[in-house]
Structure formats: C-alpha cells, structure tokens
Amino acid sequence: MKMMKKLVAVVAALTLTIGMVSTAMAASWQTYFGLNKGWYEGMKATLTSNSATGWTAKVSDIGWGGCWGGQVFKKGLSIKPGQQYNIKFTIKSSKLDKWVYLKIGDESGKKMNLGKWIDCKKGKSVTVNETFTAKYSGKDIYFGIGGDFHDRQKVKTDKDAKVRYKYAPNSKLDGRLPSNYSAGHGTVISVTGFSFGAPASNGGSSNGSSNGTVNSNGTVNTVTTSDGTVATGDFTPIACGATAVLAAAAIVVFAKRRQED
C-alpha cells in the first residue's frame, strides 16, 4: 500500500510537470513549414526546442519557395507607433550558410517597422541587437528561414518579395537555384537569448520581457497571447519544471503523512 501511494505521487508529479511545460511551450513560438503541409517548394523541418528566449529548428530541406516557405513567429505583441523598441538574439546555422529574414511589420504585414536579412555563416553565431522606433501598430515578429534565392519578384502569389528584397544586401541570398535541385540541403537553425521590449536607455531591460507593451515612460507591461497564456521569461520550461518539482515534493509529503496517520 505504501509503495502504491508513492507511485501515485510520482505519476502525479510527472503529469503536472509535463502539463506545465506544454503550456509554456505553447505560449512561445509558432511555426509554418511548407513541405510539412504539402507545399513542395517549402521547407521540411521540425521545431525541436521552444521557449520564451529562443527556438531550434531541425531542417531536413530548406526548400526553394522563398523565405516564407519556413517560418518561426511570435504573435500577441502590442507594438505602438512612435515608441522605441529593442530586439536582441543570437542566431546560428549549423551545417550550411543561410540567410534568415527578420520581419516586424504592421498589423496587415504590408508595411515595415523593421526588415533585416541576417547572413548566418556555417557553424558561426551571429548576434543581432537592433533598436528602432515603430512607425506602425504591430503584433507579430517573424523569422523567414526558408530557402530564398532572390528569384520571387515575379511570383504572383509572393506579394512580399518586392518588399523584403529591398532589404537584401546582395542579389543571390541563399545562392543560385541549381537546375538539379533536390532534397538534402539540411541544417539546424537556432535562436538563443531572445528579448524584445523597451531599450535599457528608456528604462527597459536589455534582457527583459520577451513580450510587452512599452509605455511612454519606458516601462514594459506583459501581454497575453492568443492562447490565453502570458508569454514572459518567467514562464520558461525550466521555471515550470522547478514549480512542478516543488509540487511533487508536496505530494510526496502528503502521501507520507497519510501513511503515518
């Protein structure tokens, strides 16, 4: 009977841990990988880590349908015109040179607050630390990680191409599309140390809340994402795991006391 109670306590603790970590993961980054959804030009990939401060995508094939063939994005922000923001992170591509497009647009996605192509050399980390003043209201941050060969200008369904290529530093991006292109152009793309909010000089913190509304006095309020969970650095899987461990300890103590009684 005593062993049964301990087993119940352990199972309850594990269930609580898994549930809390799942909630934290859901509150962070969302994805679209085109080939996974049946779009043959898109990226084939899996998101293998997901937290408020970063993500990792294991890519089997970068695809050739443009950067939006593979997307990792955060929604539910409150970006206000006239306010200053800082975005900071470190990004890396493990197995090949890869251009990644960072987009912070307006609510329609057609006007830009910040557009930036990031040149990720194979195996080397690149740190981005950008401060900008928003011109438009916005809610999203997008990373375009699909294979983009700077050849989408005349594709009618890719209306974003002309806009994003204005920010491109060269005419090739991920290289020229080979005539015999096939699957196998894989890599692991990771973002770590992500933060977004008011610049430290405005009263914010350079490693502060990953989501937030910036007030006129420079303070940051947390915001709620569409799934109803608050997405801040306090709700990472590690923090949830620590909470679950404490809860598990309480369950074990309770079971022990019941046995003694």
Image: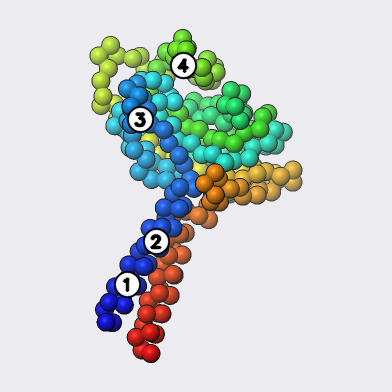
Which quarter of the figure is the N terminus placed in?
A: bottom left
Residue at disc 2, secondary structure:
helix
Residue plotted at (37% across, 80% down): 255
Give the labeled residue for mark 2: 17
Q: Which SS class for mark 1? A: helix
Q: Residue furthest right?
A: 216
Give the Cα separation between the discs numbered 3 and 1: 40 Å
Q: Amino acid at mark 4?
A: Thr
Name the residue beneath numbered marker 4.
157
Judged left or right of residue 88, residue 12 is left
* Residue 89 in the image, given as x and y percentages of width and height: 50, 40
Residue that mark 3 sits on: 37
What secondary structure is marked by label 4?
Answer: loop
- Mark 4 near mark 3, Cβ–Cβ under 8 Å? no
Which is nearer the N-term, disc 2 or disc 3? 2
Foreground tag (4 vs 2) = 4
Q: Position of residue 6 (x, y in %)?
A: 31, 76
Query: How many angstroms separate mark 4 from mark 3 (CA)?
Result: 17 Å
